[in-house]
Amino acid sequence: MDTVILYAIALAGLLISFLKDRGKTLKAVKKGLKAFEGILPQFLVVLILVAMTLSLLDTATIARYLGKGSGPLGVIIAALVGAITLIPGFVAFPAAAALLEGGAGATQIAAFVSSLMMVGVVTLPLEMKYFGRRASLLRNGLAFVFSFVAAVFVGWVVGL
Amino acid sequence: MKTFLRRYAAAIVAASVFIVFLLALPSYSARAIAMMANQTRTMLLVIPPIFLLLGLLDVWVPREKMMRYMGPDAGIRGGILAFLLGSFAAGPLYGAFPVAAVLMKKGAGFGNILIFIGAWSTTKIPMLLFEISALGPRFALSRLAIDIVGIVVIAMALKKAIPEKEVAALYAQAEKAD
Protein backbone atom coordinates (compact mmCIF):
# COMPACT_ATOMS: atom_id res chain seq x y z
CA MET A 1 0.00 0.00 0.00
CA ASP A 2 2.62 2.57 0.97
CA THR A 3 4.79 1.32 -1.88
CA VAL A 4 2.01 2.22 -4.30
CA ILE A 5 1.94 5.78 -2.91
CA LEU A 6 5.71 5.95 -3.17
CA TYR A 7 5.65 4.88 -6.81
CA ALA A 8 2.84 7.29 -7.62
CA ILE A 9 4.80 10.22 -6.14
CA ALA A 10 8.07 9.22 -7.81
CA LEU A 11 6.48 8.70 -11.23
CA ALA A 12 4.52 11.95 -11.00
CA GLY A 13 7.75 13.74 -10.10
CA LEU A 14 9.56 12.09 -12.97
CA LEU A 15 6.84 13.05 -15.45
CA ILE A 16 6.72 16.69 -14.34
CA SER A 17 10.50 16.88 -14.39
CA PHE A 18 10.64 15.33 -17.85
CA LEU A 19 8.10 17.78 -19.24
CA LYS A 20 10.01 20.70 -17.77
CA ASP A 21 13.54 19.74 -18.65
CA ARG A 22 14.79 16.52 -20.21
CA GLY A 23 18.45 17.20 -19.52
CA LYS A 24 17.86 17.81 -15.84
CA THR A 25 15.69 14.71 -15.60
CA LEU A 26 18.41 12.56 -17.08
CA LYS A 27 20.85 14.07 -14.61
CA ALA A 28 18.45 13.29 -11.74
CA VAL A 29 18.15 9.65 -12.81
CA LYS A 30 21.93 9.37 -13.10
CA LYS A 31 22.37 10.88 -9.64
CA GLY A 32 19.86 8.45 -8.21
CA LEU A 33 21.66 5.51 -9.78
CA LYS A 34 25.01 6.74 -8.56
CA ALA A 35 23.70 7.24 -5.03
CA PHE A 36 22.38 3.69 -5.13
CA GLU A 37 25.66 2.21 -6.32
CA GLY A 38 27.39 4.17 -3.58
CA ILE A 39 25.43 2.39 -0.88
CA LEU A 40 25.06 -1.02 -2.53
CA PRO A 41 27.89 -2.72 -0.58
CA GLN A 42 26.24 -1.83 2.74
CA PHE A 43 22.85 -2.89 1.41
CA LEU A 44 24.22 -6.32 0.63
CA VAL A 45 25.63 -6.71 4.15
CA VAL A 46 22.28 -5.72 5.64
CA LEU A 47 20.39 -8.16 3.42
CA ILE A 48 22.53 -11.06 4.59
CA LEU A 49 22.33 -10.07 8.28
CA VAL A 50 18.55 -9.79 8.02
CA ALA A 51 18.18 -13.16 6.33
CA MET A 52 20.23 -14.86 9.06
CA THR A 53 18.51 -13.24 12.06
CA LEU A 54 15.01 -13.71 10.70
CA SER A 55 15.63 -17.36 9.92
CA LEU A 56 16.63 -17.94 13.55
CA LEU A 57 13.73 -15.91 15.01
CA ASP A 58 10.30 -16.84 13.76
CA THR A 59 6.91 -15.60 14.96
CA ALA A 60 6.25 -18.77 16.95
CA THR A 61 9.49 -18.27 18.90
CA ILE A 62 8.68 -14.63 19.49
CA ALA A 63 5.11 -15.41 20.63
CA ARG A 64 6.34 -17.92 23.19
CA TYR A 65 8.35 -15.24 25.01
CA LEU A 66 5.74 -12.47 24.91
CA GLY A 67 2.79 -14.44 26.26
CA LYS A 68 0.48 -13.58 29.11
CA GLY A 69 2.23 -12.63 32.33
CA SER A 70 5.67 -12.33 30.76
CA GLY A 71 5.92 -9.03 32.66
CA PRO A 72 8.92 -6.70 32.52
CA LEU A 73 11.11 -9.48 31.18
CA GLY A 74 8.65 -9.90 28.30
CA VAL A 75 8.87 -6.18 27.60
CA ILE A 76 12.67 -6.33 27.50
CA ILE A 77 12.64 -9.36 25.21
CA ALA A 78 10.06 -7.66 22.99
CA ALA A 79 12.22 -4.56 22.66
CA LEU A 80 15.34 -6.62 21.97
CA VAL A 81 13.61 -8.67 19.30
CA GLY A 82 12.24 -5.49 17.75
CA ALA A 83 15.69 -3.93 17.75
CA ILE A 84 17.41 -6.74 15.86
CA THR A 85 14.69 -7.62 13.39
CA LEU A 86 13.70 -5.76 10.28
CA ILE A 87 10.11 -6.44 9.32
CA PRO A 88 8.00 -4.14 7.15
CA GLY A 89 5.02 -2.55 8.94
CA PHE A 90 2.41 -4.29 6.82
CA VAL A 91 3.79 -7.62 8.04
CA ALA A 92 4.55 -6.49 11.58
CA PHE A 93 1.13 -5.02 12.42
CA PRO A 94 -0.92 -8.12 11.60
CA ALA A 95 1.70 -10.25 13.38
CA ALA A 96 1.48 -7.94 16.40
CA ALA A 97 -2.33 -8.15 16.28
CA ALA A 98 -2.11 -11.95 16.20
CA LEU A 99 0.24 -11.88 19.20
CA LEU A 100 -2.16 -9.60 21.07
CA GLU A 101 -5.04 -11.97 20.41
CA GLY A 102 -2.79 -14.83 21.44
CA GLY A 103 -2.50 -13.28 24.88
CA ALA A 104 0.53 -11.01 24.67
CA GLY A 105 0.25 -7.76 26.63
CA ALA A 106 -0.22 -4.37 24.95
CA THR A 107 2.92 -3.09 26.71
CA GLN A 108 5.04 -5.92 25.29
CA ILE A 109 3.63 -5.41 21.81
CA ALA A 110 4.14 -1.65 21.99
CA ALA A 111 7.78 -2.21 23.00
CA PHE A 112 8.19 -4.58 20.07
CA VAL A 113 6.57 -2.25 17.51
CA SER A 114 8.43 0.83 18.78
CA SER A 115 11.89 -0.64 18.77
CA LEU A 116 11.16 -2.47 15.52
CA MET A 117 10.50 0.82 13.80
CA MET A 118 13.04 3.09 15.50
CA VAL A 119 15.97 0.81 16.24
CA GLY A 120 17.87 -1.01 13.53
CA VAL A 121 20.79 -3.11 14.66
CA VAL A 122 21.19 -4.90 11.36
CA THR A 123 20.95 -1.67 9.39
CA LEU A 124 23.72 -0.05 11.48
CA PRO A 125 26.36 -0.54 8.76
CA LEU A 126 24.15 1.51 6.42
CA GLU A 127 23.40 4.19 8.98
CA MET A 128 27.06 4.59 9.93
CA LYS A 129 28.00 5.16 6.32
CA TYR A 130 25.90 8.33 6.36
CA PHE A 131 25.90 9.41 10.01
CA GLY A 132 29.13 8.08 11.41
CA ARG A 133 29.65 5.66 14.26
CA ARG A 134 28.91 7.92 17.20
CA ALA A 135 25.67 9.47 15.94
CA SER A 136 24.34 6.11 14.71
CA LEU A 137 25.07 4.22 17.92
CA LEU A 138 23.71 7.05 20.02
CA ARG A 139 20.52 7.38 17.95
CA ASN A 140 19.83 3.67 18.20
CA GLY A 141 20.64 3.60 21.90
CA LEU A 142 18.32 6.50 22.69
CA ALA A 143 15.59 5.06 20.47
CA PHE A 144 15.92 1.73 22.30
CA VAL A 145 15.50 3.38 25.69
CA PHE A 146 12.64 5.44 24.32
CA SER A 147 10.81 2.34 23.12
CA PHE A 148 10.34 1.38 26.80
CA VAL A 149 8.87 4.80 27.57
CA ALA A 150 6.55 4.46 24.59
CA ALA A 151 5.61 0.92 25.64
CA VAL A 152 4.67 1.94 29.18
CA PHE A 153 2.66 4.89 27.89
CA VAL A 154 0.80 2.89 25.24
CA GLY A 155 0.20 0.04 27.69
CA TRP A 156 -1.25 2.54 30.16
CA VAL A 157 -3.54 4.20 27.58
CA VAL A 158 -4.80 0.86 26.24
CA GLY A 159 -5.53 -0.28 29.80
CA LEU A 160 -7.49 2.85 30.76
CA MET B 1 39.27 -3.11 -9.37
CA LYS B 2 41.21 -2.59 -6.18
CA THR B 3 38.79 0.05 -4.92
CA PHE B 4 35.92 -2.21 -5.96
CA LEU B 5 37.30 -5.02 -3.82
CA ARG B 6 37.85 -2.70 -0.89
CA ARG B 7 34.34 -1.26 -1.13
CA TYR B 8 32.75 -4.68 -1.31
CA ALA B 9 35.06 -6.36 1.24
CA ALA B 10 32.43 -6.33 4.01
CA ALA B 11 29.78 -7.69 1.63
CA ILE B 12 32.10 -10.49 0.53
CA VAL B 13 32.84 -11.38 4.17
CA ALA B 14 29.12 -11.35 4.97
CA ALA B 15 28.38 -13.56 1.96
CA SER B 16 31.02 -16.04 3.11
CA VAL B 17 29.53 -16.09 6.62
CA PHE B 18 26.14 -16.67 5.04
CA ILE B 19 27.43 -19.66 3.07
CA VAL B 20 28.99 -21.11 6.24
CA PHE B 21 25.69 -20.45 8.05
CA LEU B 22 23.75 -22.36 5.36
CA LEU B 23 26.16 -25.29 5.48
CA ALA B 24 26.49 -25.42 9.28
CA LEU B 25 22.76 -25.06 10.06
CA PRO B 26 20.95 -27.01 7.35
CA SER B 27 17.68 -26.95 9.31
CA TYR B 28 17.60 -23.15 9.04
CA SER B 29 18.91 -22.84 5.50
CA ALA B 30 15.54 -23.07 3.72
CA ARG B 31 14.13 -20.32 5.95
CA ALA B 32 17.26 -18.21 5.55
CA ILE B 33 17.06 -18.42 1.77
CA ALA B 34 13.33 -17.64 1.82
CA MET B 35 14.01 -14.61 4.05
CA MET B 36 16.78 -13.51 1.73
CA ALA B 37 14.46 -13.72 -1.29
CA ASN B 38 11.73 -11.91 0.61
CA GLN B 39 13.97 -9.06 1.76
CA THR B 40 15.58 -8.74 -1.66
CA ARG B 41 12.12 -8.41 -3.18
CA THR B 42 11.18 -5.67 -0.70
CA MET B 43 14.39 -3.80 -1.38
CA LEU B 44 14.07 -4.08 -5.15
CA LEU B 45 10.51 -2.82 -4.87
CA VAL B 46 11.22 0.08 -2.56
CA ILE B 47 14.59 1.25 -3.80
CA PRO B 48 13.87 2.54 -7.34
CA PRO B 49 11.29 5.20 -6.37
CA ILE B 50 13.34 6.37 -3.36
CA PHE B 51 16.51 6.86 -5.35
CA LEU B 52 14.55 8.41 -8.22
CA LEU B 53 13.02 10.90 -5.78
CA LEU B 54 16.34 11.78 -4.24
CA GLY B 55 17.83 12.35 -7.69
CA LEU B 56 14.94 14.67 -8.57
CA LEU B 57 15.27 16.42 -5.21
CA ASP B 58 18.96 16.91 -5.81
CA VAL B 59 18.48 18.37 -9.28
CA TRP B 60 15.40 20.52 -8.77
CA VAL B 61 15.56 21.94 -5.24
CA PRO B 62 17.98 24.86 -5.07
CA ARG B 63 20.21 25.13 -2.05
CA GLU B 64 18.89 28.57 -1.13
CA LYS B 65 15.33 27.24 -0.93
CA MET B 66 16.38 24.34 1.29
CA MET B 67 18.38 26.68 3.52
CA ARG B 68 15.40 28.99 3.85
CA TYR B 69 12.87 26.29 4.71
CA MET B 70 14.94 23.67 6.52
CA GLY B 71 18.25 25.34 7.26
CA PRO B 72 19.71 25.71 10.76
CA ASP B 73 17.98 29.09 11.08
CA ALA B 74 14.62 28.05 9.70
CA GLY B 75 13.23 27.76 13.23
CA ILE B 76 10.22 25.71 14.25
CA ARG B 77 8.86 25.79 10.68
CA GLY B 78 11.90 23.84 9.54
CA GLY B 79 11.31 21.21 12.19
CA ILE B 80 7.65 20.85 11.26
CA LEU B 81 8.51 20.54 7.58
CA ALA B 82 11.16 17.91 8.35
CA PHE B 83 8.62 16.03 10.44
CA LEU B 84 5.98 16.10 7.69
CA LEU B 85 8.49 15.07 5.01
CA GLY B 86 9.54 12.06 7.07
CA SER B 87 6.00 11.13 8.10
CA PHE B 88 4.60 11.08 4.59
CA ALA B 89 7.50 9.09 3.25
CA ALA B 90 7.00 5.41 2.76
CA GLY B 91 9.42 2.53 2.96
CA PRO B 92 11.76 1.09 5.56
CA LEU B 93 14.15 3.23 7.59
CA TYR B 94 17.17 2.36 5.46
CA GLY B 95 15.55 4.35 2.65
CA ALA B 96 15.70 7.48 4.80
CA PHE B 97 19.49 7.66 5.10
CA PRO B 98 20.35 8.44 1.45
CA VAL B 99 17.53 10.98 1.33
CA ALA B 100 18.87 12.58 4.51
CA ALA B 101 22.29 12.82 2.85
CA VAL B 102 20.80 14.82 -0.04
CA LEU B 103 18.98 17.08 2.43
CA MET B 104 22.29 17.64 4.23
CA LYS B 105 24.01 18.42 0.98
CA LYS B 106 21.35 21.01 0.25
CA GLY B 107 21.92 22.69 3.59
CA ALA B 108 19.14 21.41 5.86
CA GLY B 109 20.01 21.85 9.55
CA PHE B 110 21.30 18.85 11.52
CA GLY B 111 18.44 19.04 14.03
CA ASN B 112 15.94 18.96 11.19
CA ILE B 113 17.74 16.00 9.62
CA LEU B 114 17.41 14.13 12.92
CA ILE B 115 13.70 14.95 13.13
CA PHE B 116 13.30 13.75 9.55
CA ILE B 117 14.99 10.42 10.37
CA GLY B 118 12.89 10.00 13.51
CA ALA B 119 9.64 10.76 11.69
CA TRP B 120 10.51 8.43 8.81
CA SER B 121 11.29 5.65 11.26
CA THR B 122 8.10 5.71 13.23
CA THR B 123 5.29 8.19 12.51
CA LYS B 124 4.24 6.81 9.15
CA ILE B 125 1.03 8.43 8.03
CA PRO B 126 0.51 5.89 5.19
CA MET B 127 0.76 3.12 7.81
CA LEU B 128 -1.40 4.75 10.47
CA LEU B 129 -4.78 3.55 9.19
CA PHE B 130 -3.31 0.13 8.84
CA GLU B 131 -2.04 0.19 12.42
CA ILE B 132 -5.43 1.42 13.67
CA SER B 133 -7.24 -1.44 11.97
CA ALA B 134 -4.73 -4.05 13.18
CA LEU B 135 -4.07 -2.89 16.73
CA GLY B 136 -6.90 -0.50 17.53
CA PRO B 137 -7.18 3.31 17.68
CA ARG B 138 -6.06 3.55 21.31
CA PHE B 139 -2.86 1.69 20.62
CA ALA B 140 -2.04 3.46 17.35
CA LEU B 141 -2.93 7.01 18.40
CA SER B 142 -1.26 6.88 21.82
CA ARG B 143 1.85 5.49 20.12
CA LEU B 144 1.74 8.34 17.60
CA ALA B 145 1.43 10.92 20.38
CA ILE B 146 4.32 9.59 22.46
CA ASP B 147 6.44 9.10 19.32
CA ILE B 148 6.14 12.76 18.36
CA VAL B 149 7.54 13.70 21.78
CA GLY B 150 10.24 11.02 21.49
CA ILE B 151 11.38 12.13 18.04
CA VAL B 152 11.90 15.71 19.18
CA VAL B 153 13.62 14.70 22.44
CA ILE B 154 15.97 12.27 20.67
CA ALA B 155 16.77 14.83 17.96
CA MET B 156 17.60 17.49 20.55
CA ALA B 157 19.68 15.11 22.65
CA LEU B 158 21.68 13.94 19.61
CA LYS B 159 22.22 17.48 18.42
CA LYS B 160 23.64 18.35 21.83
CA ALA B 161 25.75 15.21 22.07
CA ILE B 162 27.44 15.22 18.67
CA PRO B 163 30.36 17.69 18.51
CA GLU B 164 30.06 20.35 15.82
CA LYS B 165 33.28 19.23 14.19
CA GLU B 166 31.82 15.79 13.63
CA VAL B 167 28.60 17.24 12.22
CA ALA B 168 30.67 19.36 9.84
CA ALA B 169 32.55 16.23 8.73
CA LEU B 170 29.24 14.44 8.04
CA TYR B 171 28.08 17.38 5.93
CA ALA B 172 31.37 17.41 4.03
CA GLN B 173 30.94 13.71 3.33
CA ALA B 174 27.36 14.23 2.09
CA GLU B 175 28.64 17.02 -0.15
CA LYS B 176 31.37 14.81 -1.58
CA ALA B 177 28.94 12.03 -2.46
CA ASP B 178 27.85 13.97 -5.55
Image (tube, rainbow, N blue to C red):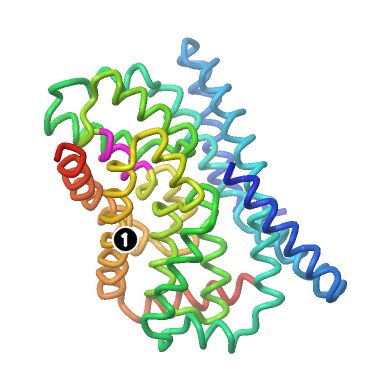
Residue type indicated by callout 1: Ile
Residue at 71% across, 75% down: B59
In this view, the residue in front, B163 or A7, is: A7
> Where residue B61 sits in the image (x, y, percent)?
65, 79
Q: Is residue B108 left or right of residue A84?
A: right
Q: Is residue A64 magenta?
A: no
> Where residue B119 sits in the image (x, y, percent)?
41, 59
Question: On the image, numbered disc 1 is attached to which residue?
Answer: B148
Q: Is residue B82 above or below residue B138?
A: below
Toward the top, the furthest residue is B27
Which quadrant of the rendered structure holds the C terminus of chain B? bottom right
Q: Secondary structure at mark 1?
A: helix
Residue range (magenta) = A109-116
Q: Is residue A27 above or below residue B130?
A: below
**Number of labelled discs?**
1
Q: Is residue A28 left or right of residue B93?
A: right
